[in-house]
Amino acid sequence: MTKISNNINETREIISKWKSQNFSIGFVPTMGYLHDGHLSLIKKSHMENNKTVVSIFVNPTQFGPKEDLSTYPRDFDADRQKCEDALVDLIFFPTAEEMYPSDYYTYVNVNYLTNNLCGRSRPNHFQGVCTVLAKLFNIIKPNKAYFGQKDAQQLSVVKKMVRDLNFDLEIVGCPIIREPDGIAISSRNSYLNKEERKAATCLSQSLKLAKELINNGECKISFIKNSMSNLISNQTLAKIDYIEFVDLNNLQPIDTIKKSSLCAIAVYIGNTRLIDNFII
Ligand code: PAF
């Protein structure tokens, strides 16, 4: 049976007991509203560890003042059932007060890697992500933590934080899980109405187009970006936030295609901001 704890001390006691039995701990941090993407991370954690812990916490510090913190989808009962079915050993489900008491003052910043892509349109977002993950890593003390490649910048930033601050764990990146029509699975897809859901396929279609152009020998990023932008702009419901090609090692823009680069996009479909990417 899946244990549930919303208390940091109790969680620590459970984890200590497992560690004393030499169990390895796999950790899947989430904001809940679990979907097949999360379940793929849980599956991978099961394959590689004795115990799997899932955190469910809609982290207020990673949302901007005009973002969707209050409307972010939540359904703990459904999440608990999915965790039971996926044989998760422990759900850590803290309150905001448990994680950020009123005298909370400490934040973690990864510079440079957070200057562009989502970091540009969402100032302080990665500070919130890194802060909560630093806390969660200290509470859960996992051997490995699992992240989806869909949030490519998050994955790079978290890897960097772990290296720079000498956290004793391995960050494992896992492939993007897609719906049959290509759309990357995300909790925010639940905001889309039928028309928007259809329009949202323009993200993965534009990435497919970029891949085709690259496979046919196109190296000029300005040309590829224009072609992607034209495809997305055909959708009246779509508004491009960014289309970027960056070096995967430092997330800085590149102007010709090379190995180990990342093509990342963010597009508003109506009011919903969606992201997607592929690695070259
Ligand atoms: O990717 C997410 O769902 C969140 O950013 C994370 C990693 C759980 C931190 O709140």
Image (spheres, rainbow, N blue to C red):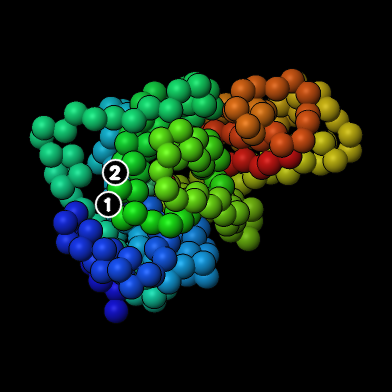
Q: Secondary structure at mark 1?
A: helix
Residues marked 1 and 2 touching at CB (< 8 Å): yes
What amino acid type is highlighted by mark number 1? Ile
Residue nearest the observer in this picture, 42 or 199:
42
The CA distance from mark 1 to mark 2 is: 6 Å
Residue 58 seen in this snapshot = yes
The residue that label 1 is drawn on is 139
Q: Residue 7 in the image: x percent, y percent? A: 16, 57
Residue in view at x 64 percent, y 56 percent: 181
Q: Is residue 256 left or right of residue 65?
A: right
The residue that label 2 is drawn on is 135
| Crowdedness near tag 2: few (<14), some (14–19) or many (≥20) residues, C-alpha within 10 Å | some
Q: Residue furthest left?
A: 102
The verdict on label 2 being within 8 Å of ligand 1 is: no
Residue nearest the observer in this picture, 159 or 166:
166
Residue 90 seen in this snapshot = no
Quadrant for residue 77, please give it. Answer: bottom left
Residue in view at x 44 percent, y 50 percent: 169
